[in-house]
Amino acid sequence: MESKNVLVVGSGISGVASALELANAGVSVYLIEKEAVIGGHSASFCCKATDICSKCSACVVSDKVKEAVIHPQITLLTNSTIKGLGGELGNFHVEIIQQPRYVDEERCIACGLCTEVCPTDPKAIYPPFAEATPFSYILDEGLCLRFKGERCDLCRGSCPTKAIEFELKSKERELNVGAIIVATGFDVFDAREKGSLGYGRYPNVLTGLDLEQIFTREGYLRLPTNGKEPRNIAFIQCVGSRDEGHGYCSQVCCKYAMKLAGLIKYQNPDTQVTIFYIDLQTTGKGFAQFYENYKESIRFVRGVPVEILQTLSGELEVRFEDISQGKVCRDTFDLVVLSVGISPGKNSWDLARILGINLADDGFFDVRDPLGSNETNIDGVFVAGTCQGPKDIPDSIAHGIAAASKAMQVLAESAIQRRGNQGRH
Ligand SMILES: Cc1cc2nc3c(=O)[nH]c(=O)nc-3n(C[C@H](O)[C@H](O)[C@H](O)COP(=O)(O)OP(=O)(O)OC[C@H]3O[C@@H](n4cnc5c(N)ncnc54)[C@H](O)[C@@H]3O)c2cc1C
């Protein structure tokens, strides 16, 4: 039977934008998310405003996520992934598998007693990030002693609202939908792959994602080693972009690095900030002006460092080729931030296989029109956001809205065609 419902896979900002566009037009939407919380990467990003808004768009995400959660036309399924697909445009049958949360989100009052008594290190039960939706504690099966066959029951025993249930099993269900929007996003480049930059080995080497989350959690930046304010910080651009394995620009790293650098300078104008870059991507509304405002107070060095060493005193020695001066130099910093880029999602291959959609050579989902449409090679299956290629938050929202409009248009056309065919028989 023909269905007008739409399934959106992935609840990052592009999936949420698609879901809201459809729901506001009266379409019933299933929004499925593989994680326990919704909003994707950008839900944990910090506001980068100084005395003026830096237009980083982080606040837009939390507003839209809250709107989606309470929208009557949107059915949200967390901890859920697609297992199989049958049917066609207008009448897809999608098999969904939903893993148990183990912590009932209605009953969890986020008191933290479960984390306190959990004996594992790191803790197997913990709160999500500050702005997470739903804000219910998360139990990690991979860390929990109970799931390793031990008899531990400490968290359940400590819970005042009896929110913890170990016995829950995964559930399978079938959804009947007319169209599918894939909005499964990206993976942050794993900086450990660039071993010579010391991430994971030197505690004062962080990534841009770490900084986003530190500012969200703490509101300010301190050195991981001694809790003191950093005095001399380097940002290294294009870590996991524009290299042998990633022949593309991630589109977002120059912007977020400069905005984070601006926030650091705003909080403490005496902090020295250096940005090492190949070439700065300053497109985007107001961004060229942003660069103009900071080009005197931030040191910009054209040249990407290839190696970082930690000295005996704990400082980080950065070796780089200064392209504009044509010489190899070294400089020391107390904190280095690697501006990690956008990589294709590791599970994209599996999803491509289940849905029958194509991946492009760069590992992102392919579209029919190389100039950036939402249509895949399968009628009725669309892509939205960074699963199709690097984008910032505003572009992901625009792509999500475009996918929703296309899905509604195609569903309407297919319904007219079916009615026409029935009339002829
Ligand atoms: C370090 C860093 C900082 C950034 N800072 C900024 C900034 O300040 N401003 C800005 O505009 N942009 C910024 N960006 C870019 C921003 O993160 C992206 O534009 C945005 O997150 C894209 O949203 P998305 O929905 O496409 O993907 P994602 O945010 O990756 O969301 C995808 C969602 O899909 C889910 N999912 C994946 N696979 C499945 C599956 N099989 N089934 C169900 N669910 C699935 C994921 O769990 C996730 O929730 C930054 C990027 C990085 C790496």
Image (cartoon, grey):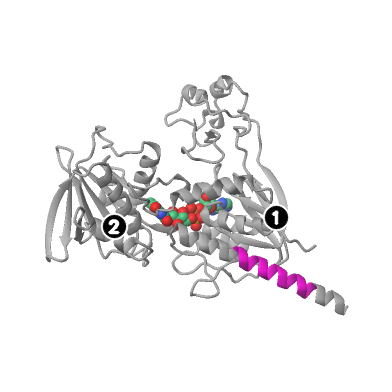
Is 294 located above or below residue 109 in the figure?
A: below
Where is the N terminus found, in terms of image quarters? Answer: bottom right
Residue 212 on image: x %, y %: 37, 46
> Which kind of residue does numbered mark 1 sit on?
Ser
Q: Count every numbered label the image shows and give the total.
A: 2
Number of other residues with Cα within 10 Å of mark 2, as a class: few under 14, some 14 to 19, many 20 or more? many
Residue toward you, 421 or 146: 421
Residue bearing mark 1: 28
Is 164 located above or below residue 422 in the figure?
A: above
Residue 214 on image: x %, y %: 36, 40
- Disc ID at residue 237: 2
Q: Check residue 417 for magenta coloring.
A: yes
Number of other residues with Cα within 10 Å of mark 1, as a class: few under 14, some 14 to 19, many 20 or more? many
Q: Check residue 378 for magenta coloring.
A: no
Magenta stretch: give its range.
404-418
The secondary structure that most of the magenta stretch takes on is helix
